[in-house]
Image (cartoon, helix red, strand yellow):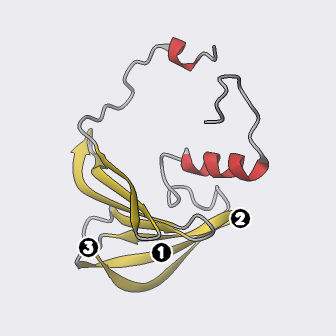
Amino acid sequence: MTGSDAPQEMPGAESATAKAQSDFDGALIDYKTKGFMVELLPAVTVAGKQAHHLKVSRKDLPTQHVYLDPDTFVELRITTEGANASETDLSDYKAIDGIMVPHSVKTSQGGAVQAELKILTVAFNAPIDDAIFKVK
């Protein structure tokens, strides 16, 4: 992203953000182990339905708000506070190997859509050639 293909060390804040974004389990799984604090707030309407509202305070990272479907407990929306505040809507959940996976993900900043993903295929533990991870 810097125009160079040589590996470069990330500054502390960028590194912390990248680490948080690479947490595939999300903020709620093992939140205590991660050092997060979760607080239940009053329910709100998200995507036309009432949703559980959880505030996730994370040391050295912006606070997140996670909105859960009250029937299935899947994440409907995740908002992140701070200078780069964002809102991510998750929908079209399908069970893959018994795990509910969103197949539609839309991220917005300042009310403008930044990315919209439609997931076509999900495979867990699929073989991956180690060569794609080698830095050239």
* Residue type beneath disc 3: Ala
User: 105 left or right of 135?
Assistant: left
**Position in image of residue 114 (x %, y %):** 42, 56
- Residue 36 visible (yes or no): no
Circles 2 and 3: CB distance less than 8 Å?
A: no
Q: Residues within 10 Å of mark 2 (few under 14, many from 20)?
A: few
Which label's residue is closer to the chain start, 2 or 3? 3
Residue tagged by mark 2? 59
Residue 101's disc is none
Which label's residue is closer to the chain start, 2 or 1? 1
Q: In the rendered image, which quarter contains the N terminus?
A: top right
**Position in image of residue 119 (x %, y %):** 28, 42
- Depth check: give the residue in front, 123 or 84: 84
Query: Could you tell me how far apart the alpha carbons at marks 2 and 1 are, in whole angstroms?
Result: 16 Å
**Position in image of residue 125 (x %, y %):** 39, 27
Measuring 73% from the left and 62% from the top, which residue is drawn there?
Answer: 60
Measuring 27% from the left and 52% from the top, which residue is drawn there?
Answer: 104
Circles 2 and 1: CB distance less than 8 Å?
A: no
Of the two numbered discs 3 and 1 in the rendering, the one whose residue sits closer to the viewer? 3
User: 55 left or right of 95?
Assistant: right
* Residue type beneath disc 1: Leu
Residue 54's disc is 1
* Residue type beneath disc 2: Lys
Element type at mark 1: strand
Residue tagged by mark 3? 47
Measuring 52% from the left and 14% from the top, which residue is drawn there?
Answer: 130
